[in-house]
Amino acid sequence: MKTGLVGEKLGHSFSREIHSLLGNTEYRNFEMPREELAGFMARRDFDGVNVTIPYKTDVIPMLDYVSDEARAIGAVNTVVNRGGRLYGYNTDFFGMRELLIKNNIPVCGSDVLILGTGGTSKTAKAVCESLGAGSVTKVSRHPEEGEISYGEAKEKYASAPVVIINTTPLGMFPNISACAVDPADFKGLCGAADAIFNPLKTEFIVRTKLCGVPACGGLYMLVAQAVKASELFYDRTYPEGTTERIYEKLLSEKENTVLIGMPSCGKTTVGRLIAEKTGKEFMDCDVLFAEKFGITPAECITKEGEEEFRKKESELIAEISKKNSSVIATGGGAVLRAENILNLKKNGTIFFIDRSVGKLTATPDRPLSQSRELIEKRYAERYGKYLAAADCRIDGDGTAEEVAELIMTRRGQK
């Protein structure tokens, strides 16, 4: 079958990988500007396509049939060609509903703010209403009837209980530092979701989680809707658990393993071992720093000062945090800047290799920990920051092989 994904920019998409895991290795991307969409649909040279930003509403007049659910929502994301007639459906509804339920986002009875007014916002509104939301309000930069502005949202819900769902492209790869709203501005925030899946967690979702609020990115939604779309393409039903199986596999493949900890705790050695065993790319921040800036971290600290080094280090971390499927060994002081942790969490799980201070080695090539006195001082200064930044603490007193095994076991890669 000739199937694929239609959209304006598709470099960020995981859809081909998902459909390949479902057995459809012929699934491809149909990236096109808006002026080519009508011609593509008119030629009908496909068996089935998914439709993504920004064409979910544009395709509706081009179809011969639109399901009642998709028509009520006002957006189509799946089109099936049956004998030359185009049938439109909305499998995003199923995907988003499954996402919110799986992650226990408390929509029922809650006031819900939906950021954005495009096709996905229409789906989100229908899903929230189906789950019994107390109210659903769209938030827009240019609000029309029934919508409110971002300023109004911040003012009205500054302390009131609210659930927020982002359907804007803000925060999507490659502009992963963008954020539609700051969750800290909503003191009553009790749940959040984002339709974006690349990065795995947007800036909005990471910040929300750091506030201690349940929040989820859009990867599970993407997988669930893809399974439903494939059932429509092939007129079949997949076994129970298919969505969960593919989601877990894709997450394991895409999510970075990020190692933090004191100098000489073994991050580089352990990281190389994990990368070798999992087939992922290994990235050593100290090596990448020298390649990017033409100076080693030690030389930078000595010649330009620690503040300039930290600035450059943050620039590097912001860059590598956009990547997937990597093992990242950070510098010992990466945790000193909150922006580094925020960025590393977007595509990664952070593991703190907690090696006892007595087992750490002072070396002359590390200006900030070149003596036993300095390394003990750094340990006292940073230990709490390592714990706060980590998603998982790992006992680092064993051999590198043992520590790598512990991390891989926690990642479910053993």
Image: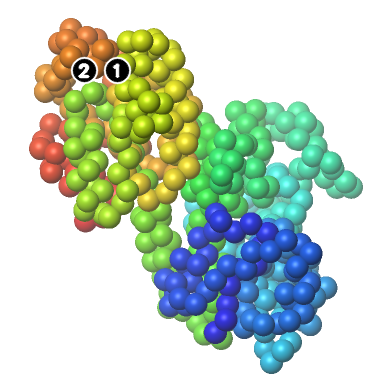
Q: Hey, what amino acid is under mark 2?
A: Asp
Indicate the quadrant containing the N terminus: top left, top right, bottom left or bottom right: bottom right
Q: Hey, what amino acid is under mark 1?
A: Ala
Q: Looking at the picture, does residue 220 appear above or below residue 28?
A: above
Query: Where is residue 179, by image quadrant?
Result: top right
Residue 44 at x, y percent in the picture: 71, 82
Query: Where is residue 45, by image quadrant?
Result: bottom right
Local packing at callout 2 (Cα closer than 10 Å; few below 14, some 14-19, many 20+) is: few
Outermost right residue: 145
Regarding residue 190, the answer to whether it shows in the image is no
Residue in the picture at 54% in, 79% down: 231
Reading the image, the residue beneath label 1 is: 298
Q: Looking at the picture, does residue 148 appear above or below residue 87?
A: above
CA separation in Å, label 2 and label 1: 7 Å
State left or right for residue 302 relative to residue 213. Answer: left
Residue in the picture at 50% in, 60% down: 14
Residue toward you, 370 or 80: 370
Residue 153 at x, y percent in the picture: 75, 35
Reading the image, the residue beneath label 2 is: 365
Q: How many callouts does the rendering have?
A: 2
Indicate the quadrant containing the C terminus: top left, top right, bottom left or bottom right: bottom left
Outermost front residue: 294
Residue in the picture at 36% in, 32% down: 291
Q: Looking at the picture, does residue 275 appear above or below residue 320?
A: below
Q: Which mark is residue 32?
A: none
State left or right for residue 64 relative to residue 372. Answer: right
Residues tagged 2 and 1 counted as in contact (Cβ below 8 A): yes
* Secondary-structure class at tag 2: loop
Local packing at callout 1 (Cα closer than 10 Å; few below 14, some 14-19, many 20+) is: some
Residue 34 at x, y percent in the picture: 76, 62
Regarding residue 371, the answer to whether it shows in the image is yes
